[in-house]
Image (cartoon, rainbow, N blue to C red):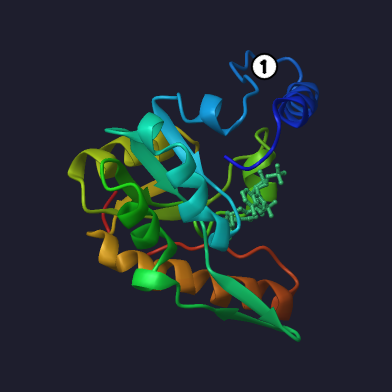
């Protein structure tokens, strides 16, 4: 959900349908108000626009699960560095901005490019945290539907801070080893 106009959203929708030709895709285009009308809403803006974007459609988000995947990062020279947003994490800031919504933090470590290549599954664990068990459950169900992604309940929203910050480490590894690293945990039974 971004600031894009409906026209720009239509362009993006057409591009995705063309790119994923031959699949039955229920993708529609909308502005933020339209996107916020969905049953589950994904917030994927730059970190410093997340709370304001959610607040702008707060009424529509009331009672809904809002999946926040924003990471607060800065690139300083060749280094990726985590930032500390208000309340410690982007997700906690968003939860405070839309207190009547059920915010869950997830998907921070899944590379968007690989996720968009839907013919090839992405191999990764996805840490999910929220103060609302229903939000954790709904987001885990969505993640589990994606081949090779494993959803892990990482507790309450206070854990969004280290989860978001760790994205800086992953990006640094990507640069250092010229790769697209993902996260997998050992020792947890399927
Ligand atoms: N890329 C990844 O691999 C990845 C993986 C996990 C998590 N994330 C996180 O997901 C978030 C989005 O990442 P991205 O790579 O998709 O970033 P992006 O391309 O910079 O932005 C995505 C969206 O944010 C909107 N946007 C930009 N500036 C805005 C503003 N000031 N106010 C409201 N909306 C704004 C854009 O809308 P318009 O096009 O209409 O401007 C676009 O829809 C980031 O917080 C990132 O840390 C990214």
Horizontal and vertical percent position of residue 7: 77, 25
Residue 161 relative to residue 113: left or right: left
Q: Which residue is mark 1?
A: 23
Q: Nearer the viewer, residue 44 or 20?
A: 44
Horizontal and vertical percent position of residue 49: 56, 56
Horizontal and vertical percent position of residue 124: 49, 54
Q: Secondary structure at mark 1?
A: loop
Going 23% across and 59% down the picture, which residue do you hit?
A: 156
Report if residue 149 is visible in the image: no
Q: Nearer the viewer, residue 157 or 154?
A: 157
| Beta carbon of the mark 1 residue lies under 8 A of ligand 1 | no
Going 68% across and 71% down the picture, which residue do you hit?
A: 174
Going 65% across and 34% down the picture, which residue do you hit?
A: 118
* Other residues around mark 1 within 10 Å, as few (<14) / some (14–19) / many (≥20): few
Horizontal and vertical percent position of residue 101: 30, 41
Residue 139 relative to residue 116: left or right: left
Q: Is residue 84 above or below residue 71?
A: below
Going 73% across and 14% down the picture, which residue do you hit?
A: 22
Q: Count the numbered circles shown.
A: 1
Kindly indicate the quadrant of the structure image that contains residue 100.
Answer: top left
Q: Is residue 84 above or below residue 139?
A: below
Q: Nearer the viewer, residue 55 or 115?
A: 55
Residue 39 relative to residue 29: left or right: left
Kindly indicate the quadrant of the structure image that contains residue 64.
Answer: top left
Q: Nearer the viewer, residue 116 or 190?
A: 116
Report if residue 58 is visible in the image: yes
């Amino acid at each position: 959900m971004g600031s894009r106009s409906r026209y720009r959203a239509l362009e993006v929708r057409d591009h995705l349908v063309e790119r994923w030709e031959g699949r039955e895709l229920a993708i529609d285009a909308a502005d933020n108000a339209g996107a916020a009308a969905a049953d589950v809403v994904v917030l994927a803006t730059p970190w410093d626009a997340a709370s304001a974007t959610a607040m702008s459609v707060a009424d529509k988000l009331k009672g809904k699960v809002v999946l926040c995947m924003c990471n607060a990062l800065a690139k300083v020279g060749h280094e990726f560095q985590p930032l500390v947003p208000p309340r410690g994490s982007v997700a906690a800031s968003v939860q405070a901005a839309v207190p009547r919504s059920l915010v869950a933090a997830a998907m921070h470590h899944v590379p968007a490019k690989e996720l968009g290549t839907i013919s090839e599954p992405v191999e990764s664990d996805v840490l999910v945290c929220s103060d609302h068990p229903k939000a954790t459950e709904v987001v885990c169900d969505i993640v589990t539907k994606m081949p090779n992604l494993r959803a892990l309940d990482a507790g309450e929203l206070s854990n969004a801070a280290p989860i978001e910050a760790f994205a800086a480490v992953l990006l640094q590894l990507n640069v250092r080893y010229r790769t697209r690293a993902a996260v997998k945990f050992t020792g947890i039974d399927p």
